[in-house]
Image: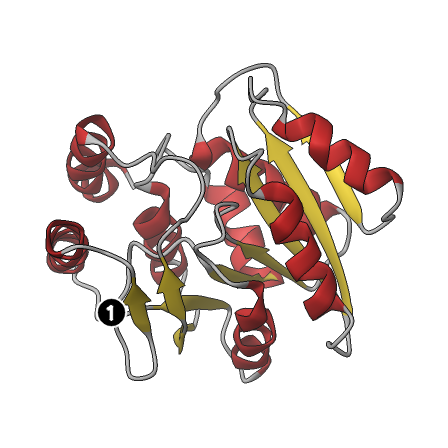
Amino acid sequence: MRVLVILPTYNEAGNIISLLDRIAYVRGMVPFDLDVLVIDDNSPDGTARLAMEYSDSNEWVYVRVRSGKLGLASAIYMGLKYAYLNGYDYALTMDADMQHDPIFIPRLVRYALGGYDLVIGSRYIAGGGILGWGIARRITSMVANLYARYMLCMKVRDLTSGYKCYGRRAMARILATGISSRGYAVQPETVYIAKRGGLRIGEAPFVFVNRRVGRSKMGLRVIAEFLLAIPRFLLFG
C-alpha cells in the first residue's frame, strides 16, 4: 500500500525540516510506503530550498515549486492529482506548521481502511482536542464549524480541519468536480464534494497543537473568503 502526504507550504522555513524529520520517524513505524510531496508557493523565506536539500538525501520526499502564491486550494488539488495519477492508495493533506502531528497518520489511514472514502482528523469528537489556543481563536473555529455544518446540512463535527485522508474514490470525485475555493474554504468544500458524490465520510480524533514557529495565516480576509464561499457551494456546486 502506498500513501502520500501532501504539504502545501508558504514561509515555513522554521518548521519544514522538523516536520519532515517527524514524518521520517512515523515512516519507520508504519507497514506501508509513505512518501511526501511538498508544494511550495515560491516562499521568500527559502522553504523550498530547505525541502529540496532534504529531498536530496531522502528519496521519499518530492518537491514542487510554483511560480507564486497560488493558494491553498490549488495546492491541495495539485497534490491530489499527483497522488491519483501516480497510483497512491491514499493521500493525506496536513499543515506544514507542526499543528498537525504526523503521529496521527497511522490512525487516519486505519480509519480509511475501515471503509471510509474520506477521513477527517477531528478536533471536535471524543479523543480529539486543541492545545495552545486562546478563547477568541476557539470561538472563531467553533462558529465557523457551526456555520458550515448548518449551511451545508452536514453532521461532520470538524468541517474546517485540514488534516484529511483521501481514498482513491474521493480523489477521483474531487478531481472530476474541481475546487472553486482559493483558500481556507477548501476544507469544507472537499467534504461537501464527497458527500454529494455519495462517498463514506468518517472522523478520527486528533489533538491540534498551536504553532510555535512562524505566524498564523488566519486573518479577516481569510475569514471573509470562508463565509462567502459556503453559499457559493450551494448555488454552483
Q: Residue at x 60, y 48 (%)?
A: 6
Q: Return the x and y of residue 110 as percentages of the image width and height.
A: 58, 80
Where 148 sits versus 181, above or below? below
Image side of residue 153 versus residue 21, left or right: left
Identify the residue position indicated by label 1 in the image.
157
- The number of callouts visible is 1
Where 230 sits versus 122, above or below? above
- Quadrant for the C terminus, please: top left
- Quadrant for the N terminus, please: bottom right
Q: Return the x and y of residue 150 as percentages of the image width and height.
A: 11, 59
Q: Residue at x 15, y 38 (%)?
A: 227
Q: Quadrant of residue 197?
A: bottom left
Image side of residue 92 versus residue 146, left or right: right
Q: Return the x and y of residue 202 as percentages of the image width and height.
A: 40, 75
Q: Residue at x 22, y 36 (%)?
A: 229
Q: Quadrant of residue 138?
A: bottom left
Along the viewing direction, whichever of 217 and 181 lies nearer the viewer: 217
Along the viewing direction, whichever of 237 and 137 lies nearer the viewer: 137
Q: Return the x and y of residue 162 as percentages of the image width and height.
A: 41, 53
Where 90 sits versus 134, above or below? below
Name the amino acid type tagged 1.
Answer: Arg
